[in-house]
Amino acid sequence: MIKIMRNFARRIFSGIFSKRGEIKLGFYGSPNAGKTSLANRICQDWLGEDLGKVSKVPHETREIQIKEKVILEKDGKKVEFKLIDTPGIATKVDFEDFLKYGLNKKEAQKRAKEATKGIIESIKWLDDMDAVIVLIDATINPYSQVNITIIGNLIARKIPILIAANKIDLKKADIKKVKGAFPEYEVVGISAKEGKGMDDFYEELFKLIKKTR
Amino acid sequence: MVKNKKSIKSSGSKDLTIHFMPYSEIVKENTIGRIKKIMGLVLEGKIIILQGRLNPYEEARLIENSMTLIGNIKGFQGIEIAAVSGDKDRGVFERVRFNIAKILVGEQDAITIIGPATIVKEIKRNPKKIELMLQRK
């Protein structure tokens, strides 16, 4: 309850005091799509530090993580971002899935409980974004209802989106399939982990922010 | 804190119940009413085949609602959901007609499958088909 009130207060105050020109850039997607990895990559490229911890265990990010004053520069033009890394959205959470990763029952149950709260928080934060990067794991079927629901909600709120098909360094990655699933939207192939495709990503990001003003 | 947790109902046998929900059944309901109706059936362990689809806000609310119930309803692990729309390769005239019909009577040219995650393991989908993978008990 205290956490909910604290988050609510933070959102109200961040709204009041947010600087003009600062772009609230959200990272959305299913668990393990690479949201934190991409946010970390951007922070490393422009700040030289990470935003959050990454893990192979799903639902590693269970609270909204924010990095302010991330300034990106292109052709002499500086743009200030507030990066908002969100917990992965899922339609189901089973604590037993975490046991496979070596967590004990108590830890797994705690993680599951926090994950469900994180998903609710992610959905609530949809209204606060200026632009969103939707992360899709290019090694798995992109036609998931979570991807469709996230994109549908962003479109309904008129929030500009860029789809990042992540993990293109892996053999199984199929960027064509991601493009085929969402032909109406810009899709850029990246490997947040390896840093592949980041030049194209930044190019598309600067195009995206033009739509926010 | 919930002391006496409710639990997800099961028919007691190994029978699987598929509930067909025509669009007319939810058309007059508001978002809360629709979600209540769907979650009621899901908590009875039924798989719903809904004529039409929920709007994006309703889909998000359905996910939020499911997350709230995990941990409070014994055995409930969330839902599986997939929606497929009709033929997207419409001409301009067809698209205009479709959008007008969508405003007037809702998107009935779609099918949504919703089921409890304890029963529906996975819904595999591509643009033209849906495959329902059930949990083996």
Image: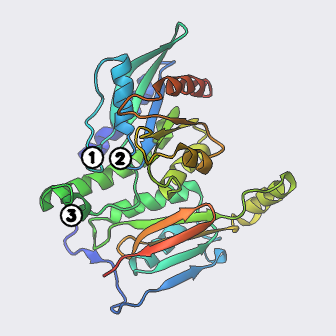
Q: CA distance from mark 3 to mark 1?
A: 32 Å
Residue type, label 2: Asn
Confirm whether residue B68 shows in the render. Answer: yes
Residue wearing tag 2: A32
Residue type, label 1: Lys
Residue appearing at x 45%, y 81% in the figure:
B46
Residue wearing tag 3: B1
Q: Secondary structure at mark 1?
A: loop
User: Is A143 left or right of A47, judged from the image as shown?
Assistant: right
Residue wearing tag 1: A56
Which sits earlier in the primary sequence, circle 1 or circle 2? 2
Residue appearing at x 50%, y 83% in the figure:
B18
Which of the two residues, A119 or B84, is positioned nearer the viewer here? B84
- Residue A43 position in % (x across, y down): 35, 23
Q: Secondary structure at mark 3?
A: loop
Name the residue at the right extreme.
Answer: B93
